[in-house]
């Protein structure tokens, strides 16, 4: 799925209880056409399945991950976490050029890292400042300026997954941080 970063975003949204097309579109901010293509691709790969349930008001259709889909999502999360940890390690080494190259080579997965809560946004922002680059160079506006913190995406699991985590990197990184004890 490396070539299709939206796949992991959609799988994650479905795993967090976004089971209908419009709910997935709202949570992921993926256009209808692109979401249709992504869902078709995931269904063809047997990572998701459309199920029908009988309810009070008729038949209810929803998307669910297959066992294969759940395994794929876990593998991709692990890969993205390793990628993020590599990025942090390069940043801490103080090598701007190497960090820029790594980010350029992995540009397509950065929104996935953000959506899955793997990326620490504060640390990423510091990395961008370290390289003198705007965050918008790597994160689409729909992900940066949406209602990610207030949308019902976080309510699906009872908490917001967009805040990231420190991933065990609490020493503040390279360079002079102005005398403050910055703990990302």
Image (tube, rainbow, N blue to C red):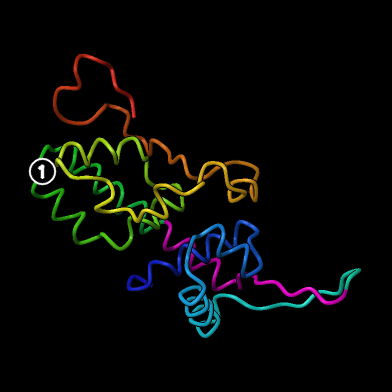
Residue that appears at 43% across and 67% down? 6
Residue 66 placement (x, y as % from top left): 61, 73
Q: Quadrant of residue 175?
A: top left
Q: Which quarter of the image is occupied by the N terminus?
A: bottom left
Q: Is residue 184 left or right of residue 64?
A: left
Give the farthest residue toward the right: 56
Residue drawn at the location 61% of the way across and 56% of the way down? 16
Is 141 within the magenta?
Answer: no
Residue 120 in the figure: left or right of residue 71: left
Position of residue 105 in the picture relative to residue 73 (left or right): left
At mark 1, the secondary structure is: helix
Q: Nearer the viewer, residue 85 or 16?
A: 16
Q: Residue at x 49, y 60 (%)?
A: 29
Please say if 83 is above or below 169. below
Quadrant in the picture for the C terminus: top left
Vertical relation: 76 (above or below) 182: below
145 left or right, relative to 52: left
The residue identified by callout 1 is 96
Residue 172's x, y, as percent?
26, 27
Tell how many labels.
Answer: 1
Tell me where the magenta segment starts and ends, as one range.
58-77
Above or below: residue 124 compared with residue 12: above
Along the viewing direction, whichever of 78 and 135 lies nearer the viewer: 135
Q: Residue at x 33, y 60 (%)?
A: 109
Label 1 Cα neighbours within 10 Å, binned few <14 / some 14-19 / many ≥20: some
**Magenta stretch: includes residue 72:** yes
Q: In the displayed structure, would residue 46 be above or below residue 184?
A: below
In percent of width and height, residue 156 lies at 65, 51
Farthest-out residue, top: 179
Q: Nearer the viewer, residue 128 or 134?
A: 134
């Amino acid at each position: 799925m490396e070539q299709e970063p939206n796949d992991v975003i959609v799988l994650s949204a479905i795993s967090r209880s976004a089971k209908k097309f419009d709910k997935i579109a709202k949570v992921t901010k993926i256009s209808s056409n692109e979401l249709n293509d992504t869902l078709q691709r995931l269904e063809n790969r047997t990572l998701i399945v459309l199920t029908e349930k009988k309810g009070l008001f008729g038949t209810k259709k929803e998307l669910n991950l297959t066992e294969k889909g759940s395994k794929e999502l876990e593998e991709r999360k692990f890969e993205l976490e390793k990628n993020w940890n590599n990025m942090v390690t390069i940043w801490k080494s103080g090598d701007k050029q190497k960090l820029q190259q790594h980010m350029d080579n992995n540009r397509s997965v950065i929104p996935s890292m953000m959506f899955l809560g793997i990326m620490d946004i504060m640390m990423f922002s510091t990395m961008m400042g370290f390289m003198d680059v705007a965050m918008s160079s790597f994160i689409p506006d729909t992900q940066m300026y949406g209602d990610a913190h207030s949308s019902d995406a976080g309510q699906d699991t009872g908490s917001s997954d967009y805040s990231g985590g420190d991933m065990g990197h609490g020493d503040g990184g390279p360079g002079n941080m102005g005398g403050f004890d910055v703990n990302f």
